């Protein structure tokens, strides 16, 4: 079954950290560029970070640069998003995706609140 399953979301205080995980199955993961998107309340889905198939190149939206890190483990078919120094405006549902396949997970809720 071709699928992506996110985990690791939750409630965190401003300045805190979370690590999101995404488990991939049903396709050749090591050949696939991966990405994280998010949808904030009342907004459309937006790009957060992406990583190439070999993990060498990464890219981020300006608002998370220096705070978030995308990584992957091709041996485990996993992609991660380490989120540090979280801000209130990072509150969103975070989606793992393989954009070129138009394949997306169901999302995991991240809430930053004091």
Image (cartoon, rainbow, N blue to C red):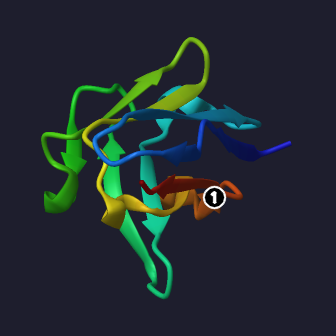
Left or right of 17 in this view: 7: right
As helix, strand or loop, the secondary structure at mark 1 comes to: strand
Residue 15 in the image: above or below residue 91 = above
Q: Residue 34 at what x, y percent from top left? A: 45, 44
Q: Residue 25 at what x, y percent from top left? A: 73, 34
Tell me where residue 22 sits by quadrant: top right
Tell me where residue 6 sits by quadrant: top right
Q: From the image, which quarter does the N terminus lie in?
A: top right
Residue 1 in the image: above or below residue 110 = above
Q: Residue at x 69, y 37 (%)?
A: 27
Tell me where residue 55 sits by quadrant: top left
Q: Nearer the viewer, residue 94 or 34?
A: 94
Q: Residue 112 at what x, y percent from top left? A: 44, 55
Q: From the image, which quarter does the C terminus lie in?
A: bottom left
User: Where does label 1 land, which residue?
Assistant: 103
Q: Is residue 34 visible?
A: yes
Residue 23 in the image: above or below residue 88 = above
Q: Residue at x 18, y 60 (%)?
A: 63
């Amino acid at each position: 079954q071709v699928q992506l399953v996110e985990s690791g979301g939750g409630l965190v205080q401003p300045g805190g950290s979370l690590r999101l995980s995404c488990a991939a199955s049903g396709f050749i993961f090591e050949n696939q560029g991966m990405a994280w998107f998010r949808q904030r309340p009342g907004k459309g889905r937006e790009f957060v970070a992406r990583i190439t198939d070999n993990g060498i190149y990464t890219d981020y939206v300006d608002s998370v640069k220096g705070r978030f890190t995308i990584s992957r483990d091709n041996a485990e078919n996993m992609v991660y998003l380490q989120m540090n120094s979280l801000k209130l405006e990072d509150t969103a549902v975070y989606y793992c995706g393989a954009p070129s396949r138009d394949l997306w997970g169901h999302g995991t809720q991240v809430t930053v609140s004091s």
